[in-house]
Amino acid sequence: MKVRDALRFVYDKQKKMFILGGIISLLDWDQKTYMPRKASTDRALQISLLSKSLHQLMVSDDLWKNIEFLTREKNVEKLSEEDRIVVERLKRDVEKARKIPTDFIERMSKAEATSYSAWEVAKKRSRFDIFCPHLERIVELKREYCGYINLEGHIYNNLLDDYEEGMRYERLKPAFEYLRDKLSRLLNKLESEKKIDLKLSKKAQERLSFTILKYLGLKRDRFRMDLSEHPFTTRLSTFDVRITTRYVKDKPLSSLFSTMHEAGHAIYELNLPKGRFRYTVISDAPSLGLHESQSRFWENIIGRNYSFWKFFYPILKRIEPALKPSVEEIYRYVNSVERSLIRTEADEVSYNLHIILRFEIETELLNGEIEVKDLPEIWNEKMEKFLGVKP
């Protein structure tokens, strides 16, 4: 076997995986935007079948054989620095994937797709009992997954490592405990009244969202924006990024910040490596923390800055000529601090308390310290303890 032949094989295999992953993402995007509700059962089957096929490609013996060949010391020396990074990154991903049975991937992807449709119904009806059995199944499968990966330390490390490689529960827990107490005191100190005489129709909010995307440099031939119950961003291919937002009647600027947040994700996705690396593992974000830093940079560092509002206020005025608040009033409004029930609408002080709350609940669920059926009561208790509000 020659190095160039093995490298070509590895790159060709990654291209197939990238394309198949994009198809799965398209099905997932459609499920969360336009798919008829009655199609949920078949959609779960479609996604699970394709996820199984993708996993089989990734764990195939021929791919592993070529990766092992390329990572031998005498062969690594023949690779360019870029190719070496691709092969080593791919090897780490494939090693982890080979720990997981293909039938588990099929079961997990089916359960996740099915549970999303149930969550949408449960949310609209405020009926946790509808979603409860699905979440119980997800928790059960996550525990099974952790058993396959089997990293040292806390069971939660097996999930953390998928999102932030090398991050560990043992490092996060003391940091979160320190922040939780400090942030709670800061919230009590800085809480301010969040009222403003500002009304924007759904049409005005939509115009505002598309306008800010243009100013952020997103080109309409590389993205589209739609509505979903929970805003998200997904990349279907190199030049096809989908973002969603939502319009909240009594929170007229909520969609603007949601759109700026998702635009940050989209900008990052559209600027990942291209050329001969476009279908490789290095065309994916190496860190979800890095990904989130880009979205929150545009949402908060830019979007809540006075200089931004001096620029954007005249645009808002053109879209809504009856606008009453001044630029100073809007600036104070978007930087006010309050106790919020909704994480995505939380200010910069209280936002991390929402994260810490979820961290505690997730770790306790994985450990078996709490049960899914008790989550509504536990959630309410922690919301009141951390944020001083009760749903």
Image: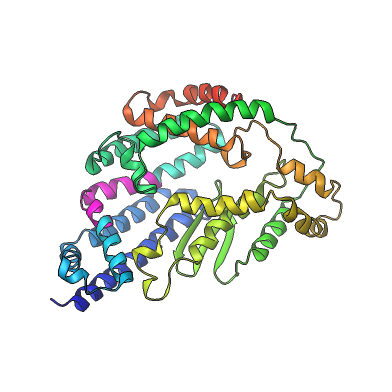
Q: Of residues 368 and 138, which is closer to you in this image?
A: 368
Quadrant assignment for the N terminus: bottom left
Magenta stretch encompasses residue 373: no
Which quadrant of the structure image shows residue 210?
Answer: bottom right
Q: Of residues 367 and 84, which is closer to you in this image?
A: 84
Q: Position of residue 118 (x, y in %)?
A: 45, 40
Q: Position of residue 145 (x, y in %)?
A: 27, 42
Q: Residue at x 20, y 77 (%)?
A: 5
Q: Residue at x 74, y 35 (%)?
A: 194
- What sort of colour scheme is used for the picture? rainbow
Q: Position of residue 252 (x, y in %)?
A: 72, 46
Q: Is residue 345 left or right of residue 79?
A: right
Quadrant assignment for the C terminus: top right
Outermost residue, left side: 1
From where the camera sits, is residue 8 visible?
Answer: yes
Q: Main secondary structure of the magenta part?
A: helix
Q: Residue at x 60, y 32 (%)?
A: 341
**Relative height, residue 267 to residue 327 (above, below):** below
Magenta stretch encompasses residue 107: yes
From where the camera sits, is residue 134 visible?
Answer: no
Q: Of residues 31 and 156, which is closer to you in this image?
A: 156
**Relative height, residue 11 to residue 137 (above, below):** below
Magenta range is 93-113
Q: Residue at x 37, y 71 (%)?
A: 277
Q: Position of residue 308 (x, y in %)?
A: 72, 55
Q: Is residue 34 left or right of residue 389?
A: left
**How many numbered badges does the structure rendering display?**
0
Which quadrant of the structure image shows residue 20?
Answer: bottom left
